[in-house]
Image: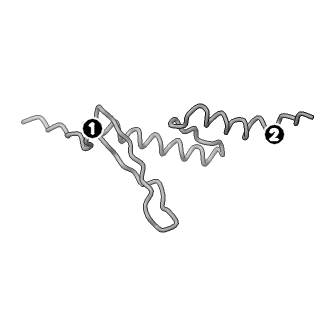
Amino acid sequence: MPRPKKEQPNHSGGLYEVKITIGKTLDGKLIRKSFYSSTSKADAKQQADEWKIQQEASKISGLPHVNKDLKFSEWAKIWLETYKKPKVKPHI
């Protein structure tokens, strides 16, 4: 019995891509997010599943989900406004 053929990358850069629907806009258009892997389509699917789990956990716990694509300078501003500003007295 021959071996099953390995699935070819489905993205132009030689990467495997998996797209998931994460919501809809006010117009009713789908909002989609792509996940890429250089090893296999199953790996990209696993990344998408992990992202979904993290989103659900952040909804349940009420804590914000940290976006790894966020730059440090952007996160620092959010951190200052969210966590430090309420606890620091204004300088007179």
Q: Nearer the viewer, residue 9 or 63?
A: 9
From the viewer's perspective, is 51 left or right of 91? left
Disc 2 is placed on an element classified as helix
Q: Residue at x 50, y 62 (%)?
A: 25
Nearer-the-camera pick, 47 or 61: 47
Name which residue type carries label 2. Answer: Pro
Quadrant housing residue 78: top right
Q: Nearer the viewer, residue 5 or 11?
A: 11
Q: Which residue is mark 2?
A: 86
Residue extending farthest bottom:
27
Residue wearing tag 1: 13
Residue 2: % across, % down:
7, 35
Mark nearer the viewer, 1 or 2: 1
> Extreme right residue here?
92
> Against 72, is 34 above or below?
below
**Which residue occupies the foreground of this view, 81 or 43?**
81
The percent position of residue 7, horizontal first and vertical second, equals 20, 40
Q: Amino acid at mark 1?
A: Gly
